Image (cartoon, helix red, strand yellow):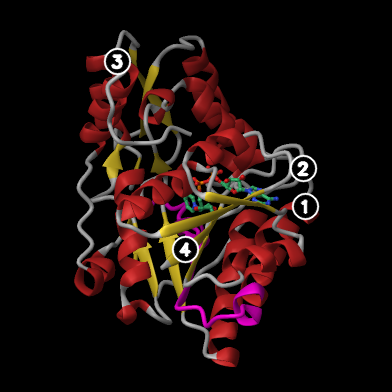
Amino acid sequence: MNVLITGISGRVGANLAVQLMKKGYDVRGVVYPGDPATAKARKLGAEIYEADMDDAEGVARACDGCDHIVHLAAQMKQGNSTVQRMFAINALGTLNVLEGAVRSSRPVQSVLLAGTDQAYHPFVSDRTTFYEDHPQHPIDIYALTKVMSEQMLYTYGRQYDLPIKVMRFGSVIAADEPLQLFYPAWLDSYVNGEWTTPGRIPWFGADKVEAARAAVAAALKTPNGVCAIMDEAGNSWGLPFTDVRDTVDGIIRVMESKDAVGQAFNLVGPAATPFVKVAQLTAAHTDRPYIEVRMPFLWWFNVSNAKARSILGYEPKYTYEDMLQSALAFRRGEDIGVVPV
Ligand SMILES: NC(=O)c1ccc[n+]([C@@H]2O[C@H](COP(=O)([O-])OP(=O)(O)OC[C@H]3O[C@@H](n4cnc5c(N)ncnc54)[C@H](O)[C@@H]3O)[C@@H](O)[C@H]2O)c1
Protein backbone atom coordinates (compact mmCIF):
# COMPACT_ATOMS: atom_id res chain seq x y z
CA MET A 1 0.00 0.00 0.00
CA ASN A 2 1.42 3.37 -0.84
CA VAL A 3 0.43 6.76 0.46
CA LEU A 4 1.14 10.16 -1.02
CA ILE A 5 1.53 13.00 1.48
CA THR A 6 1.49 16.52 0.12
CA GLY A 7 3.12 18.82 2.66
CA ILE A 8 5.42 16.03 3.86
CA SER A 9 8.01 18.54 5.06
CA GLY A 10 5.52 20.22 7.41
CA ARG A 11 4.59 19.83 11.07
CA VAL A 12 1.90 17.21 10.44
CA GLY A 13 3.22 15.66 7.20
CA ALA A 14 6.65 14.66 8.53
CA ASN A 15 5.17 13.02 11.62
CA LEU A 16 2.51 11.26 9.57
CA ALA A 17 5.20 9.90 7.22
CA VAL A 18 7.16 8.42 10.13
CA GLN A 19 4.12 6.70 11.64
CA LEU A 20 2.88 5.36 8.28
CA MET A 21 6.30 3.90 7.47
CA LYS A 22 6.33 2.26 10.92
CA LYS A 23 3.03 0.61 9.99
CA GLY A 24 4.54 -0.75 6.78
CA TYR A 25 3.15 1.71 4.23
CA ASP A 26 5.32 2.94 1.36
CA VAL A 27 5.29 6.71 1.60
CA ARG A 28 5.73 9.24 -1.14
CA GLY A 29 5.85 12.97 -0.47
CA VAL A 30 5.70 16.23 -2.37
CA VAL A 31 8.00 19.17 -1.68
CA TYR A 32 7.97 22.38 -3.70
CA PRO A 33 11.05 23.58 -5.58
CA GLY A 34 13.09 25.60 -3.12
CA ASP A 35 11.20 24.34 -0.04
CA PRO A 36 13.63 25.19 2.79
CA ALA A 37 12.52 21.99 4.57
CA THR A 38 13.47 19.70 1.65
CA ALA A 39 16.44 18.22 3.55
CA LYS A 40 14.14 17.46 6.51
CA ALA A 41 11.74 15.66 4.15
CA ARG A 42 14.50 13.69 2.45
CA LYS A 43 15.81 12.49 5.83
CA LEU A 44 12.48 10.80 6.57
CA GLY A 45 13.27 8.05 4.05
CA ALA A 46 10.17 8.54 1.90
CA GLU A 47 10.22 8.83 -1.89
CA ILE A 48 10.28 12.56 -2.67
CA TYR A 49 8.66 14.27 -5.67
CA GLU A 50 9.28 17.93 -6.38
CA ALA A 51 6.25 19.95 -7.47
CA ASP A 52 4.61 23.21 -6.54
CA MET A 53 0.95 22.71 -5.66
CA ASP A 54 -0.02 24.99 -8.56
CA ASP A 55 1.81 22.72 -11.04
CA ALA A 56 -0.95 20.41 -12.31
CA GLU A 57 1.35 18.02 -14.18
CA GLY A 58 3.87 17.75 -11.34
CA VAL A 59 1.11 17.05 -8.81
CA ALA A 60 -0.50 14.49 -11.15
CA ARG A 61 2.82 12.65 -11.50
CA ALA A 62 3.10 12.44 -7.71
CA CYS A 63 -0.49 11.16 -7.39
CA ASP A 64 -0.18 8.51 -10.07
CA GLY A 65 -0.47 4.95 -8.75
CA CYS A 66 -1.08 5.87 -5.09
CA ASP A 67 -3.56 3.95 -2.93
CA HIS A 68 -4.19 6.87 -0.58
CA ILE A 69 -3.55 10.58 -0.95
CA VAL A 70 -3.31 12.73 2.18
CA HIS A 71 -3.41 16.33 1.03
CA LEU A 72 -1.81 18.50 3.71
CA ALA A 73 0.17 21.06 1.70
CA ALA A 74 -1.04 24.60 2.27
CA GLN A 75 0.07 28.10 3.06
CA MET A 76 -1.41 29.01 6.44
CA LYS A 77 -0.14 32.60 6.80
CA GLN A 78 -0.18 35.01 3.92
CA GLY A 79 2.95 36.80 5.16
CA ASN A 80 4.58 38.76 2.36
CA SER A 81 2.93 36.77 -0.43
CA THR A 82 -0.30 37.71 -2.21
CA VAL A 83 -3.86 36.43 -1.81
CA GLN A 84 -3.56 35.17 -5.38
CA ARG A 85 -0.54 33.04 -4.46
CA MET A 86 -2.27 31.69 -1.38
CA PHE A 87 -5.30 30.85 -3.50
CA ALA A 88 -3.09 29.09 -6.06
CA ILE A 89 -1.37 26.94 -3.43
CA ASN A 90 -4.41 26.14 -1.30
CA ALA A 91 -7.39 26.08 -3.67
CA LEU A 92 -5.89 25.37 -7.11
CA GLY A 93 -3.54 22.96 -5.35
CA THR A 94 -6.52 20.94 -4.08
CA LEU A 95 -8.03 20.89 -7.57
CA ASN A 96 -4.72 19.58 -8.92
CA VAL A 97 -4.67 16.80 -6.32
CA LEU A 98 -8.24 15.78 -7.20
CA GLU A 99 -7.44 15.78 -10.93
CA GLY A 100 -4.33 13.73 -10.16
CA ALA A 101 -6.50 11.25 -8.26
CA VAL A 102 -9.09 10.80 -11.03
CA ARG A 103 -6.40 10.57 -13.72
CA SER A 104 -4.30 8.05 -11.77
CA SER A 105 -3.44 4.80 -13.56
CA ARG A 106 -4.86 2.88 -10.56
CA PRO A 107 -8.10 3.50 -8.61
CA VAL A 108 -7.41 5.57 -5.51
CA GLN A 109 -8.78 4.18 -2.24
CA SER A 110 -9.11 7.53 -0.53
CA VAL A 111 -8.28 11.20 -0.83
CA LEU A 112 -8.00 13.06 2.50
CA LEU A 113 -7.97 16.83 2.91
CA ALA A 114 -6.70 18.89 5.84
CA GLY A 115 -9.44 21.40 6.60
CA THR A 116 -9.48 23.74 9.56
CA ASP A 117 -11.61 24.69 12.55
CA GLN A 118 -10.94 28.28 11.48
CA ALA A 119 -13.59 27.86 8.79
CA TYR A 120 -16.30 27.77 11.49
CA HIS A 121 -15.40 31.38 12.33
CA PRO A 122 -14.36 30.35 15.85
CA PHE A 123 -13.67 33.94 16.90
CA VAL A 124 -16.42 34.03 19.48
CA SER A 125 -16.98 35.19 23.03
CA ASP A 126 -19.95 32.96 23.82
CA ARG A 127 -18.10 29.67 24.44
CA THR A 128 -19.50 27.93 21.37
CA THR A 129 -18.67 24.27 20.78
CA PHE A 130 -18.35 23.59 17.06
CA TYR A 131 -19.68 20.32 15.65
CA GLU A 132 -19.10 19.20 12.06
CA ASP A 133 -22.53 20.41 10.91
CA HIS A 134 -21.93 23.97 12.11
CA PRO A 135 -22.11 26.42 9.18
CA GLN A 136 -18.71 27.39 7.83
CA HIS A 137 -18.32 31.16 7.61
CA PRO A 138 -14.70 31.98 6.81
CA ILE A 139 -13.48 35.46 7.67
CA ASP A 140 -10.14 35.34 5.89
CA ILE A 141 -8.63 34.10 2.65
CA TYR A 142 -6.95 31.10 4.32
CA ALA A 143 -10.19 29.73 5.76
CA LEU A 144 -11.98 30.53 2.50
CA THR A 145 -9.50 28.41 0.51
CA LYS A 146 -10.07 25.56 2.94
CA VAL A 147 -13.88 25.73 2.60
CA MET A 148 -13.48 25.85 -1.19
CA SER A 149 -11.17 22.84 -1.01
CA GLU A 150 -13.73 20.91 1.03
CA GLN A 151 -16.41 21.74 -1.54
CA MET A 152 -14.11 20.56 -4.33
CA LEU A 153 -13.71 17.21 -2.56
CA TYR A 154 -17.46 16.78 -2.16
CA THR A 155 -17.96 17.71 -5.84
CA TYR A 156 -15.38 15.17 -7.05
CA GLY A 157 -16.93 12.62 -4.72
CA ARG A 158 -20.30 13.11 -6.42
CA GLN A 159 -18.97 13.54 -9.96
CA TYR A 160 -16.46 10.66 -10.03
CA ASP A 161 -17.47 8.57 -7.02
CA LEU A 162 -14.03 9.42 -5.65
CA PRO A 163 -13.69 8.18 -2.03
CA ILE A 164 -13.04 11.52 -0.36
CA LYS A 165 -12.59 12.30 3.36
CA VAL A 166 -12.34 15.64 5.13
CA MET A 167 -10.48 16.33 8.37
CA ARG A 168 -10.67 19.58 10.30
CA PHE A 169 -7.65 20.23 12.50
CA GLY A 170 -7.32 22.82 15.23
CA SER A 171 -4.17 24.48 16.65
CA VAL A 172 -1.75 21.60 16.10
CA ILE A 173 1.55 21.87 17.98
CA ALA A 174 4.69 19.74 17.87
CA ALA A 175 7.90 19.17 19.82
CA ASP A 176 8.91 22.34 21.73
CA GLU A 177 6.21 24.60 20.25
CA PRO A 178 4.29 24.87 23.57
CA LEU A 179 7.34 26.71 24.90
CA GLN A 180 7.19 29.20 22.04
CA LEU A 181 3.63 30.36 22.77
CA PHE A 182 1.98 32.90 25.05
CA TYR A 183 4.71 35.51 24.75
CA PRO A 184 3.36 39.08 24.59
CA ALA A 185 4.66 39.22 21.00
CA TRP A 186 2.42 36.24 20.16
CA LEU A 187 -0.66 38.09 21.41
CA ASP A 188 0.56 41.23 19.66
CA SER A 189 0.74 39.37 16.33
CA TYR A 190 -2.99 38.60 16.61
CA VAL A 191 -4.26 41.87 18.03
CA ASN A 192 -2.08 44.32 16.11
CA GLY A 193 -1.37 41.99 13.19
CA GLU A 194 -3.96 39.58 11.91
CA TRP A 195 -7.14 40.90 13.54
CA THR A 196 -6.66 44.59 12.82
CA THR A 197 -4.86 44.74 9.47
CA PRO A 198 -5.87 47.91 7.57
CA GLY A 199 -9.41 47.76 6.25
CA ARG A 200 -10.30 44.63 8.20
CA ILE A 201 -13.25 44.63 10.58
CA PRO A 202 -11.95 43.38 13.95
CA TRP A 203 -14.14 40.43 14.96
CA PHE A 204 -14.26 41.61 18.59
CA GLY A 205 -15.59 45.06 17.69
CA ALA A 206 -13.87 48.21 16.44
CA ASP A 207 -14.81 49.99 19.68
CA LYS A 208 -12.51 47.66 21.66
CA VAL A 209 -9.39 48.04 19.54
CA GLU A 210 -7.91 50.88 21.59
CA ALA A 211 -8.31 49.07 24.92
CA ALA A 212 -6.99 45.83 23.40
CA ARG A 213 -3.90 47.62 22.08
CA ALA A 214 -3.30 49.20 25.50
CA ALA A 215 -3.44 45.78 27.19
CA VAL A 216 -1.00 44.35 24.64
CA ALA A 217 1.36 47.34 25.02
CA ALA A 218 1.40 46.81 28.80
CA ALA A 219 2.21 43.10 28.32
CA LEU A 220 4.99 43.88 25.85
CA LYS A 221 6.87 45.63 28.68
CA THR A 222 7.66 42.10 29.92
CA PRO A 223 8.80 40.55 26.63
CA ASN A 224 9.71 37.24 28.26
CA GLY A 225 6.40 37.00 30.13
CA VAL A 226 3.95 34.14 29.81
CA CYS A 227 0.53 35.70 29.26
CA ALA A 228 -2.48 34.55 31.27
CA ILE A 229 -5.04 36.06 28.93
CA MET A 230 -8.51 36.74 30.27
CA ASP A 231 -11.37 39.19 29.83
CA GLU A 232 -11.92 42.14 32.15
CA ALA A 233 -14.04 40.00 34.49
CA GLY A 234 -11.23 37.45 34.85
CA ASN A 235 -12.68 34.75 32.53
CA SER A 236 -9.84 32.89 30.86
CA TRP A 237 -9.49 32.76 27.08
CA GLY A 238 -9.25 29.22 25.73
CA LEU A 239 -9.22 26.98 22.68
CA PRO A 240 -8.51 23.33 21.84
CA PHE A 241 -4.78 22.76 21.26
CA THR A 242 -3.90 19.46 19.60
CA ASP A 243 -0.68 17.48 19.97
CA VAL A 244 0.61 16.46 16.55
CA ARG A 245 0.74 12.83 17.77
CA ASP A 246 -3.04 12.89 18.24
CA THR A 247 -3.50 14.55 14.84
CA VAL A 248 -1.42 11.83 13.16
CA ASP A 249 -3.33 9.08 14.96
CA GLY A 250 -6.59 10.64 13.77
CA ILE A 251 -5.42 10.92 10.15
CA ILE A 252 -4.45 7.26 10.02
CA ARG A 253 -7.83 6.29 11.46
CA VAL A 254 -9.61 8.39 8.82
CA MET A 255 -7.42 6.94 6.06
CA GLU A 256 -8.00 3.33 7.05
CA SER A 257 -11.74 3.65 7.71
CA LYS A 258 -14.28 2.82 5.01
CA ASP A 259 -16.92 4.51 7.18
CA ALA A 260 -15.09 7.81 6.77
CA VAL A 261 -15.79 8.07 3.03
CA GLY A 262 -17.77 11.20 2.22
CA GLN A 263 -17.54 12.44 5.82
CA ALA A 264 -15.93 15.36 7.64
CA PHE A 265 -14.31 14.89 11.06
CA ASN A 266 -13.05 17.37 13.62
CA LEU A 267 -9.66 16.01 14.70
CA VAL A 268 -8.74 18.07 17.73
CA GLY A 269 -7.25 17.55 21.19
CA PRO A 270 -9.14 16.21 24.22
CA ALA A 271 -10.68 19.55 25.29
CA ALA A 272 -10.41 23.32 25.11
CA THR A 273 -7.46 24.54 27.19
CA PRO A 274 -7.86 27.66 29.33
CA PHE A 275 -5.01 30.11 28.63
CA VAL A 276 -4.68 30.96 32.33
CA LYS A 277 -3.92 27.32 33.14
CA VAL A 278 -1.41 27.21 30.28
CA ALA A 279 0.34 30.30 31.64
CA GLN A 280 0.40 28.88 35.19
CA LEU A 281 1.92 25.61 33.96
CA THR A 282 4.46 27.32 31.72
CA ALA A 283 5.56 29.73 34.45
CA ALA A 284 5.88 26.84 36.91
CA HIS A 285 8.17 24.89 34.57
CA THR A 286 10.28 27.71 33.10
CA ASP A 287 11.89 30.94 34.30
CA ARG A 288 9.36 33.08 32.41
CA PRO A 289 7.40 35.51 34.60
CA TYR A 290 3.63 35.00 34.80
CA ILE A 291 1.70 38.08 33.71
CA GLU A 292 -2.03 38.67 33.73
CA VAL A 293 -3.35 40.26 30.56
CA ARG A 294 -6.90 41.61 30.83
CA MET A 295 -8.42 42.08 27.40
CA PRO A 296 -11.67 43.97 26.71
CA PHE A 297 -13.32 40.82 25.31
CA LEU A 298 -13.39 37.03 25.75
CA TRP A 299 -12.10 34.54 23.17
CA TRP A 300 -13.09 31.03 24.09
CA PHE A 301 -14.34 28.19 21.92
CA ASN A 302 -14.32 24.42 21.79
CA VAL A 303 -14.47 21.94 18.93
CA SER A 304 -16.23 18.62 19.43
CA ASN A 305 -14.35 15.46 18.52
CA ALA A 306 -17.33 13.24 19.45
CA LYS A 307 -17.98 12.13 15.86
CA ALA A 308 -14.37 10.97 15.35
CA ARG A 309 -14.52 9.23 18.73
CA SER A 310 -17.69 7.32 17.92
CA ILE A 311 -17.04 6.42 14.25
CA LEU A 312 -13.26 6.05 14.22
CA GLY A 313 -12.43 5.19 17.83
CA TYR A 314 -10.29 8.35 17.94
CA GLU A 315 -9.10 9.03 21.48
CA PRO A 316 -6.85 12.07 21.72
CA LYS A 317 -4.48 11.52 24.63
CA TYR A 318 -2.40 14.62 25.11
CA THR A 319 -3.55 17.37 27.46
CA TYR A 320 -1.74 20.71 27.38
CA GLU A 321 0.22 19.64 30.45
CA ASP A 322 1.41 16.51 28.56
CA MET A 323 2.40 18.67 25.59
CA LEU A 324 4.36 20.97 27.86
CA GLN A 325 6.13 18.06 29.58
CA SER A 326 7.02 16.63 26.16
CA ALA A 327 8.32 20.02 25.05
CA LEU A 328 10.55 20.24 28.12
CA ALA A 329 11.80 16.69 27.51
CA PHE A 330 12.47 17.57 23.87
CA ARG A 331 14.52 20.61 24.95
CA ARG A 332 16.52 18.36 27.30
CA GLY A 333 17.45 16.30 24.24
CA GLU A 334 15.20 13.31 25.00
CA ASP A 335 13.57 11.39 22.15
CA ILE A 336 9.83 12.09 22.39
CA GLY A 337 9.07 10.43 19.06
CA VAL A 338 8.15 13.68 17.30
CA VAL A 339 9.75 15.31 14.26
CA PRO A 340 10.08 19.01 15.12
CA VAL A 341 8.84 21.74 12.81
N1 LIG B 1 -1.07 23.49 12.26
C1 LIG B 1 -2.32 23.83 12.56
O1 LIG B 1 -2.60 24.34 13.65
C2 LIG B 1 -3.44 23.56 11.58
C3 LIG B 1 -4.76 23.84 11.96
C4 LIG B 1 -5.79 23.61 11.05
C5 LIG B 1 -5.49 23.11 9.78
N2 LIG B 1 -4.19 22.88 9.44
C6 LIG B 1 -3.89 22.38 8.09
O2 LIG B 1 -3.16 21.18 8.19
C7 LIG B 1 -2.22 21.06 7.12
C8 LIG B 1 -0.85 20.74 7.67
O3 LIG B 1 -0.49 21.76 8.57
P1 LIG B 1 0.99 21.88 9.16
O4 LIG B 1 0.84 22.41 10.54
O5 LIG B 1 1.75 20.64 8.92
O6 LIG B 1 1.56 23.06 8.24
P2 LIG B 1 3.05 23.39 7.82
O7 LIG B 1 3.06 24.83 7.47
O8 LIG B 1 4.01 22.88 8.83
O9 LIG B 1 3.24 22.54 6.49
C9 LIG B 1 2.70 22.95 5.27
C10 LIG B 1 3.30 22.12 4.16
O10 LIG B 1 2.80 22.63 2.92
C11 LIG B 1 3.88 22.70 2.01
N3 LIG B 1 3.69 23.73 1.01
C12 LIG B 1 3.54 25.07 1.23
N4 LIG B 1 3.49 25.72 0.06
C13 LIG B 1 3.58 24.78 -0.92
C14 LIG B 1 3.58 24.83 -2.33
N5 LIG B 1 3.50 25.98 -2.98
N6 LIG B 1 3.68 23.68 -3.02
C15 LIG B 1 3.81 22.49 -2.37
N7 LIG B 1 3.81 22.38 -1.03
C16 LIG B 1 3.70 23.51 -0.31
C17 LIG B 1 5.09 23.04 2.89
O11 LIG B 1 6.31 22.70 2.22
C18 LIG B 1 4.83 22.18 4.11
O12 LIG B 1 5.34 20.88 3.90
C19 LIG B 1 -2.32 22.36 6.34
O13 LIG B 1 -3.17 22.15 5.23
C20 LIG B 1 -2.98 23.31 7.30
O14 LIG B 1 -3.71 24.31 6.62
C21 LIG B 1 -3.16 23.07 10.31
Q: Which residue is mark 3?
A: 332
Instruction: Return the disc, 2 or 4, that comes first in the chain's sequence.
Output: 4
Mark 2 and mark 1 in contact (Cβ < 8 Å)? yes
Q: Nearer the viewer, mark 2 or mark 3?
A: 3
Q: Which residue is mark 1?
A: 85
Q: Give the distance between the C-alpha atoms of the residues marked 2 and 4, in whole angstroms.
A: 30 Å
Q: Is label 1's Cβ within 8 Å of ligand 1?
A: no
- Asked which secondary structure carries label 3, the reply is loop
Q: Is residue 59 above or below residue 171?
A: below
Q: Is residue 78 above or below residue 57?
A: above
- Residue numbers of the magenta segment: 100-129
- Asked which secondary structure carries label 2, the reply is loop
- Asked which secondary structure carries label 4, the reply is strand
Query: Hey, what amino acid is under mark 2?
Result: Ser
Residue 44 is situated, as x and y percent measured from the top left of the image, at 47, 41
Residue 220 is situated, as x and y percent measured from the top left of the image, at 52, 15
Query: Hey, what amino acid is under mark 1?
Result: Arg
* The one of 26 and 274 positioned closer to us in this rendering: 26
Query: Hey, what amino acid is under mark 3?
Result: Arg
Q: Residue at x 65, y 73 (%)?
A: 100
Give left or right: position of 151 versus 81: left
Instruction: Return the disc, 4 or 1, that comes first in the chain's sequence.
Output: 4
